[in-house]
């Protein structure tokens, strides 16, 4: 994306929600650092989609995450995937395809988790792994 495209996108975003930053120079710098490696058309499309559904102006980091997409499953989805995986392994049935982040959590927590305390242990570990995964995936 060129700087001119980025300036146009930032200004369109701010105008859409009628929220102009107090320090535009710093805001342009933040937009450049977070979005310059992305396709301008993709960012433009995401701003349009958000304008239809959101009441508040998106933060530049949110725009980046939404344009890149493919976020991690929710913690409840991860726990459900774990239970299906554990059941398949214990019953000798076909092992389902599991998201890479869920696999990392299973490697950390082990198998045989079933109680509410086990679920909380798994979810806590999962959320920690997801936080690091997001840093790697979404960092410019």
Image (cartoon, rainbow, N blue to C red):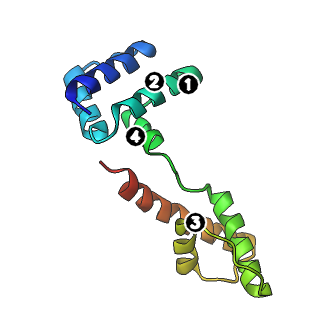
Tag 4 residue: 64
Residue for point 30% across, 19% down: 8
Q: Mark 1 and mark 4 in contact? Answer it, CB < 8 Å.
A: no
Q: Is residue 117 visible?
A: no
Q: Position of residue 122 (x, y in %)?
A: 61, 70
Q: Disc 4 and disc 3: Cα gap in Å? A: 22 Å
Residue at figure coordinates x 43%, y 55% from the top left: 134
Using a 10 Å C-alpha cutoff, classify the residue at mark 2 as few (fewer than 14 neighbours), some (14 to 19) or many (20 or more): some
Determine the secondary structure under disc 3: loop
Q: Nearer the viewer, mark 1 or mark 4?
A: 4
Residue indicated by mark 1: 54
4 vs 2, front mark? 4
Relative depth, front residue between 36 and 122:
36
Q: Residue 96's spot in the image, x, y percent?
A: 69, 72
Please tell me the numbered disc located at residue 57: 2
Which is more toward the observer, 121 or 7?
A: 7
Which residue is found at the position 27% from the left and 33% from the top?
Answer: 1
Frontmost of labels 3 and 2 is 3
Q: Quadrant of residue 124?
A: bottom right
113 or 29, which lies in front?
A: 29
Label 2 sits on a secondary structure element that is loop
């Amino acid at each position: 994306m060129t700087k001119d495209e980025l300036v146009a996108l930032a200004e369109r975003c701010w105008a859409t929600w009628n929220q102009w930053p107090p320090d535009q120079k710093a805001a342009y710098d933040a937009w450049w650092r977070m979005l310059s490696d992305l396709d301008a058309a993709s960012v433009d499309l995401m701003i349009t989609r958000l304008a239809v559904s959101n009441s508040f102006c998106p933060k530049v980091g949110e725009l980046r995450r939404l344009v890149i997409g493919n976020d991690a499953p929710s913690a409840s989805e991860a726990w459900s995937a774990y239970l299906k995986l554990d059941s398949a392994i214990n019953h000798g049935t076909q092992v389902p395809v599991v998201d890479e982040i869920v696999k990392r959590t299973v490697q950390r927590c082990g198998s045989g988790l079933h109680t509410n305390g086990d679920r909380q242990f798994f979810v806590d570990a999962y959320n920690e792994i997801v936080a690091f995964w997001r840093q790697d995936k979404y960092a410019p």
